[in-house]
Image (cartoon, grey):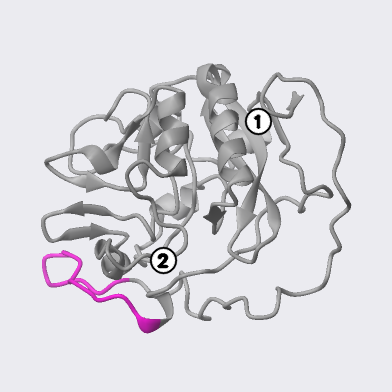
């Protein structure tokens, strides 16, 4: 199903966006090693602490996604069933706590760090599809930048950790970090926004591991989330909770329907 602001009436398309080759002048390029260098471990297999490389301390990349860019400056989105092809390239397995028909596939525009609109994709629980679209329309109008929005694959989940991922996503069929239960992502009821700029922090543990520079929330950089900003307000409007409000740990990237 195609939608603009979920089920609100269609609007006229905006001006056609020119398609220059490459990225805009001044847009930082990601280092060639991004996503390719597994983190070092000790003899027990524990990942060793690591500092943020200089190239990632003010991260502002726009990575190519699986879908073509939009032809309009207006926000647009679609939602519908998850097809077999989409399911096959996701992390879905029969043991997941939801069935495929409980999920919905979204495409929606988002604003990149290159100051251009992009088209992203996401799998969510079908019951929250239009609410999620409402949130991302607000982020798009505010031009809150996202690096990448795509489906997490089984290969992503099984790869050796490189500590530098930054995918804005929802459905990932995995356990909760450090707990013996399914993550809210496995239900399609949690979304992570720019994980690198908004890391998970529990004591000395930082995830993604190379994002330690972003534990300094006084150094304000693009793509970061702060209390009562447009990201937090937009999720609160649909009744979702923010992991940045938690006390025992901070999961700054994390928004969820059931506050876990």
At x 56%, y 43%, the residue is 139
**Mark 2 — residue?**
221
Membership of 72 in magenta stretch: no
**How would you classify the magenta stretch by its main secondary structure?**
loop
- Left or right of 120: which side holds 135? left
At x 66%, y 40%, the residue is 108
* Element type where label 1 sits in the image: helix
Residue 177: image quadrant is top left
- Left or right of 49: which side holds 147? right
At x 36%, y 47%, the residue is 253
Residue 86: image quadrant is top right
- Left or right of 83: which side holds 168? left
- Magenta-colored span: 39-54
**From where the camera sits, is residue 189 visible?**
no
Membership of 50 in magenta stretch: yes
* Element type where label 2 sits in the image: loop
- Left or right of 119: which side holds 43? left
Q: Which of marks 1 and 2 is nearer the N terminus?
A: 1
Query: Residue 113, image x and y in percent?
Result: 58, 63
Query: Residue 145, image x and y in percent?
Result: 55, 56
- Foreground residue among 44 and 124: 124
């Amino acid at each position: 199903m195609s939608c603009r602001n979920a089920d609100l009436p269609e609007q006229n398309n905006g001006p056609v966006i020119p398609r220059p080759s490459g990225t805009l002048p001044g847009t930082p390029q990601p280092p060639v090693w991004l996503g390719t260098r597994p983190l070092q471990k000790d003899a027990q297999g524990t990942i060793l602490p690591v500092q943020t490389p200089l190239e990632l301390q003010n991260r502002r990349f726009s990575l190519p996604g699986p879908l073509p860019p939009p032809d309009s400056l207006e926000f647009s989105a679609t939602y519908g069933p998850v097809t077999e092809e989409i399911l096959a390239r996701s992390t879905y397995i029969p043991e997941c706590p939801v069935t495929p028909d409980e999920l919905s596939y979204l495409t929606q525009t988002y604003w990149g760090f290159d100051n251009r609109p992009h088209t992203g994709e996401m799998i969510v629980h079908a019951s929250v599809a239009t609410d999620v679209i409402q949130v991302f329309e607000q982020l798009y109008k505010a031009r809150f930048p996202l690096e990448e929005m795509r489906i997490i694959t089984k290969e992503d989940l099984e790869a050796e950790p490189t500590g530098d991922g930054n995918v804005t996503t929802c459905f990932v069929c995995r356990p909760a970090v450090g707990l013996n239960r399914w993550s809210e992502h496995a239900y399609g009821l949690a979304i992570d926004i720019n994980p690198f700029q908004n890391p998970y922090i529990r004591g000395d543990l930082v995830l993604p591991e190379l994002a330690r520079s972003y534990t300094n929330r006084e150094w304000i950089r693009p793509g970061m989330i702060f209390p009562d900003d447009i990201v937090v307000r937009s999720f609160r409007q649909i009744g979702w909770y923010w992991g940045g409000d938690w006390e025992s740990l901070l999961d700054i990237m994390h928004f969820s329907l059931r506050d876990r």
